[in-house]
Image: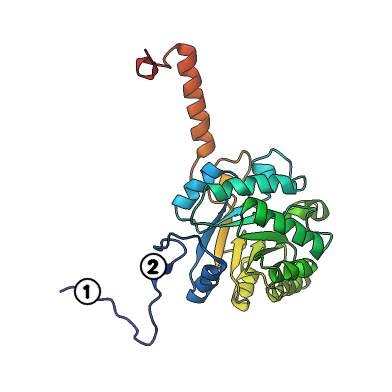
Amino acid sequence: MTHVAAQNPARPQADSSKALYGGKGTRRITVRDIAAAKERGEKWPMLTAYDAMTASVFDQAGIPVLLVGDSAGNCHLGYESTVPVTLDEMIMLSSAVVRGTSRSLIVGDLPFGSYQEGPTQALRSATRLVKEAGVTAVKLEGGERSAHQIELLVQAGIPVMAHIGLTPQSVNAFGGYPVQGRGEEAAQQLRRDAKAVQDAGAFAVVLELVPAELAAEVTTALHVPTVGIGAGAGCDAQVLVWTDMAGMTDGRMPKFVRQYAALRESLGDAAKAFADDVVGGAYPAEEHSFH
Ligand code: KIV
């Protein structure tokens, strides 16, 4: 006898063809799709990307949202932190990622110094990312302190992903990358920040390095999705820097990273094998030669 799964007729089954990850859609994901996923209770993945080729791999793997993060500073451009990254650099990287993708929603990061002066500067910078790079949305750091910027961008028709908790552009003020929201006062500030960015119109909020219990509480309280990084399993979405996720980054990994490949080792091995073949005369072989 064929087993038929019991269904509750009072609760319609979610339409899995609409899923952000694993669904059937081929058009570019929109912020409305993101809102619908929160209503369905669907969890989704986000990765960073900084170039067209890597972005096309993630797009074809079905990753629904790609962030051209200013983590490009450390992971792509060779800076010590995200602080030196410029708006022109973000536009160049973001436009490559847009060109390499057809389905993923592309979020471009506003770098340090491109929005802190106030809403007018934020609008000028975000407009450049949208018009020149073709991103669908922008991300900026800060809760209550960035609410006016978010409000003006949203009024102007630019979707905004907020970023609270550990905000890496403030590394010099934090004196490192400490977990945020620990203790009652800090937790209250995080709750206020989350509410402020939602009220300002952000379509999603990154929670970075926040205790899991607090992140889960904020996720339940908000009607927009939370995207966790070092914020536990209770968030609606999870993001990792792609070079961390794929084992490409050199050095010690933060506690929250799980590595799904060992690309750095594979690439180094490939480079050494190529070099050995060249030095030993094994490459190029006859089949690689023209006559
Ligand atoms: O720049 C970045 O990659 C980020 C993510 C870590 C959220 O802000």
- Label 1 element class: loop
User: Residue 162 placed where, x, y %?
Assistant: 68, 64
**Image quadrant in which you'd find residue 146:** bottom right
Q: Is residue 38 above or below residue 114?
A: below
Tell me the number on the disc at residue 3: 1
Tell me the number on the disc at residue 68: none
- Label 2 element class: helix
**Image quadrant in which you'd find residue 123:** bottom right
Nearest to N terminus: mark 2 or mark 1: 1
Confirm or reject: label 1 Cβ below 8 Å from ligand 1.
no
User: Residue 56 placed where, x, y %?
Assistant: 49, 47
Q: Give 177 or 199, whichever is nearer the viewer.
A: 199
Q: How many marks?
A: 2
The mark closer to the camera, 2 or 1, is: 2
Residue occupying image coordinates x 58% and y 63%: 232
Task: Bin the neighbour count of mark 1 within 10 Å (Cα to Cα): few under 14, some 14-19, many 20 and up.
Answer: few
Residue occupying image coordinates x 64% and y 51%: 133
Q: Is residue 226 above or below residue 58?
A: below
Read off the residue under disc 2.
Answer: 17
Q: Is residue 260 visible?
A: no
Which amino acid lies under the numbered mark 2 shown in the image of this protein? Ser
Q: Is residue 49 above or below residue 127?
A: above
Residue occupying image coordinates x 39% and y 73%: 15
Q: Residue furthest bottom?
A: 10
Residue occupying image coordinates x 67% and y 60%: 139
User: Residue 140 placed where, x, y %?
Assistant: 71, 60
